[in-house]
Image: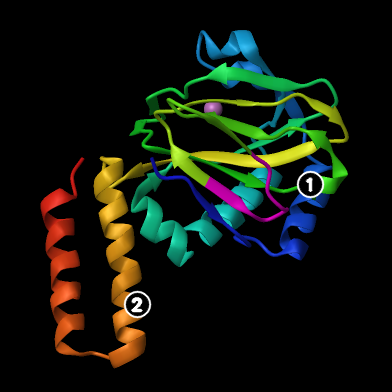
Amino acid sequence: MMFIAIPSVLTAAEAAAIRAAAGDLEFADGRETAGRFAREVKSNHQARPSPGLEAIQAKVTGALMAHPVFLSAARPRALTPLILSRYRQGQTYGLHVDDALMGGLRTDLSFTLFLEDPAAYEGGALVVEDALESRAIKLGAGDLILYPSTTLHRVEPVTAGTRLAMVGWAQSWIRPTAQREVLFDLDQAIEEVFARDGKSGPFDRLARTRSNLLRMWAGE
Ligand code: NI
């Protein structure tokens, strides 16, 4: 199962600018956008549609779709509109699985972009459950965690301060996690081979292999 933490998708200054802009937005009860069962355990607020929110969504989507690690790990075909979520003291999102279909997309990967300094709030970790273990993830402002949408996960109650984050989903060109992992490793190897020897024979063969695997595996 591939969990990838991507540091500094946004700079500290960019995250701070979004926090400041969020202060001017109107927020609504997050239950409005939750599925029937997730609604039972969801207690947060989400920014209502507005030009201010659209500017934030465009900024973050642009940063993601230009980020080499995000592109390599997710192979995104499309992203859902990003949600700006806010948890204040006492708010939480209990254990749930994300809807498989959202806005015409199949959700292959979920991600959370943390926007608040972890020292500014208590609790609020994202906990993703695996078959054997659960891991609690709380990253710095501007850092992102990417994980398969097939998992059960929750957000621990915030006990002090405010947790602001953007969440979203990607439909990937490569649906199986194991295949995405192979391509992620291959990207890494190609970079290393190129850094060491430039455009050599091994580089060409690895690049051809990657390209042809993508052709074989890329699908709906
Ligand atoms: Ni979720």
For the residue labelled by badge 2, is the local secondary structure a helix, a strand or a loop?
helix
- Residue at 86% in and 44% down: 120
**Along the line of sight, the residue nearer the viewer: 142 or 95:** 95
First to last magenta residue range: 137-145
- Residue at 44% in and 66% down: 68
How far from the left and from the top, in percent, is residue 50? 67, 39
Cα distance between the residues tagged 1 and 2: 33 Å
| Position above or below: 82 against 133 | below
In the shown orientation, is residue 115 left or right of residue 217?
A: right
**Along the line of sight, the residue nearer the viewer: 47 or 2:** 2
What secondary structure is the stretch in magenta mostly built from?
Answer: loop
Q: Which residue is mark 2?
A: 191
Image quarter where ligand 1 lies = top right
Q: Is mark 1 within 8 Å of ligand 1?
A: no
Instruction: Residue type at mark 1: give it.
Output: Pro
- Residue at 21% in and 82% down: 203
Q: Residues within 10 Å of mark 2 (few under 14, many from 20)?
A: some
Q: Quarter holding the C terminus?
A: top left
Q: Which residue is mark 1?
A: 118
- Residue at 67% in and 43% down: 53
Q: Is mark 2 within 8 Å of ligand 1?
A: no
How far from the left and from the top, in percent, is residue 33? 57, 21
Instruction: Residue type at mark 2: give it.
Output: Glu
For the residue labelled by badge 1, is the local secondary structure a helix, a strand or a loop?
helix
Q: Residues within 10 Å of mark 1 (few under 14, many from 20)?
A: some
Q: Residue furthest front?
A: 132
Is residue 158 within the magenta segment? no
